[in-house]
Image (cartoon, rainbow, N blue to C red):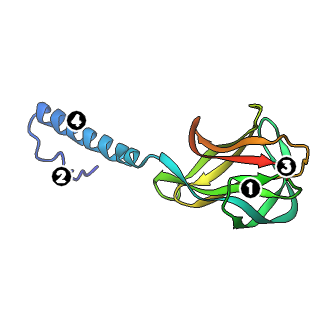
Amino acid sequence: MIGYPIPLFSNLKTEADMRARFIAVLAWALLLCTAGQGLAQEVTGGSILEYGRYEITLSGDLVSQGGQDANDVHRLTGHQLAETTDRIPIRDNVTFGYDWMAQGRPEDAEISITLLLIYPNGRMDRGFDAATIGSAHHTSLTIHDLDMPEGRYVLAVHYQGKRLVSRDFNLYKP
């Protein structure tokens, strides 16, 4: 078998030299392997871009929402801010919520989020979804139950148990 000298090891004279070079190469390889760890996903916060009452467009297909209080919902295909307000009349098909964005790195990384709706009596509904760092997302609720109690409702988005964004809305009977 014909061997060719490996430049990293060809000029080594003693076993100690070889061991020292091997440790240096191993350390360098370990550094290269862990360099990507510095690019690990990090969510640093969130911001609300706009909030209020929305006009929405829904698909005809029902989508199952996972979570503690799972419901079948229509997929939102479009939304337009109708009015910037936190006072929402309890009327059928009135939609309120906000557009928001997660900040962090790397841009375009997908994260798993928890959506919370907190009622005036403290009851909480949960849903789960995915979001992308650096992209706008929409979170909203459409009123169908005209017997909803008046009061303060909180729509919140959490990531790994910490609140990214939230907004209080005061619902009233007109």
The residue drawn where x is 59% and y is 56% is: 100
Q: Which mark sits nearer the N-terminus, 4 or 1?
A: 4
The residue drawn where x is 87% and y is 61% is: 61
Q: Give the residue furthest to the front.
A: 174
Query: CB under 8 Å between callouts 4 and 2?
Result: no
Q: Which mark is in front, 1 or 3?
A: 3
Q: Residues within 10 Å of mark 2 (few under 14, many from 20)?
A: few
Q: Which mark is in front, 1 or 2?
A: 1
The numbered disc on residue 173 is 3
Which residue is identified by label 1? 96
| Position of residue 96 in the picture relative to residue 9 (left or right) | right
Q: Which mark sits nearer the N-terminus, 2 or 3?
A: 2
Which residue is identified by label 4? 23
In what element is the residue under mark 2? loop
- Residue closer to the observer: 150 or 65: 150
In what element is the residue under mark 3? loop
Q: CA distance from mark 4 to mark 2?
A: 16 Å
